[in-house]
Amino acid sequence: MLVGYQKTISMKTYILKRIAGLACAVALWAPALTHGDAPSTVNSGEALKLLQAGNQRYVDGKLNSITPEEMTQRRAELVQGQKPFAVVVCCSDSRVGPEIIFDQELGNIFVVRTAGQVLDAAGIGSIEYAVAHLGSPLVLVLGHEHCGAVAAAVADAKEPGHIAAIVKAIRLAVKRTQGLKGDPVENAVQANVQDIAARLRATGPILAAKVNAGSLKVTGATVSLSTGKVKLVPDGQE
């Protein structure tokens, strides 16, 4: 009887240990099942504030988006899925990496980058994917100071190969700003951002419908290379 009793206690202890181990495993992986795969909980206004706060940290030289210890956990979370709170459409220029400029960790922003932010069908489709499938409530078109693509369009440069298509796409912004006071390149940088944002707001069937429904905001901004500060730009002409 004593042997049977001891076996019963041992079995109960084993089961309890297994349950405890399972609970620990669930607790360990819970962030991966909820954080990375959870629907976005911010609206467009809150998303913009998150980007602005991150940019201020960048300007101040106080980046804190993630620690080395958190990186491993964050990678594990993102294996389960992504829910970026914003789409950033920006230039390919090596000086304006958006994850750094906005001090954001992996999985927070969905980035589409081309020279001069020039968008083709693939670029727009990428934005639509982030909005329709990942639930991003904000699209920020980000231009930058001393943009080489815009400068080439202002100079009416005759570029070889496919570079010519980039310059051609920016010429409308150059034409719209001719004769304005100030630096012609910086004027065209802002106008180009405005033109791209306006085009995205009017692009159906996905983006325009969500903008009209109030579930998506598309806006523009520029970043200073010298200070790192991001400045919102007015919408401009639709």
Image (spheres, grey):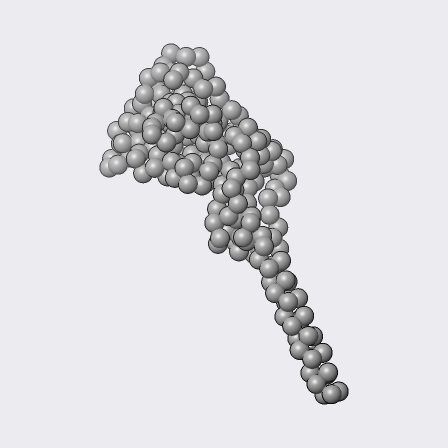
Q: Quadrant of the C terminus?
A: top left
Name the spot of residue 2 as percent of width and height, x first. 75, 87
Quadrant hosting residue 125: top left
Q: How many marks?
A: 0
- Left or right of 107: which side holds 161? left
Seen at 41% across and 12% down, the residue is 180
Name the spot of residue 201 as percent of width and height, x first. 39, 25
Is residue 112 among what the camera can see?
no
Q: Which residue lies furthest to the front in this view?
A: 1
- Left or right of 59: which side holds 116? left
Seen at 39% across and 27% down, the residue is 209
| In the depicted structure, whether residue 29 falls above or below residue 98 | below
Instruction: Return the residue nearer the eye: 182 or 75.
Output: 75
Instruction: Return the residue nearer the eye: 125 or 195.
Output: 125
Instruction: Return the residue nearer the eye: 50 or 194.
Output: 50
Instruction: Return the residue nearer the eye: 116 or 159.
Output: 116
| In the depicted structure, whether residue 185 falls above or below residue 24 | above
Is residue 87 among what the camera can see?
yes
Name the spot of residue 99 as percent of width and height, x first. 51, 41
Seen at 73% across and 83% down, the residue is 5
Q: Which residue lies furthest to the left in this view?
A: 161
Quadrant hosting residue 113: top left
Q: In which quarter of the image is the N terminus?
A: bottom right
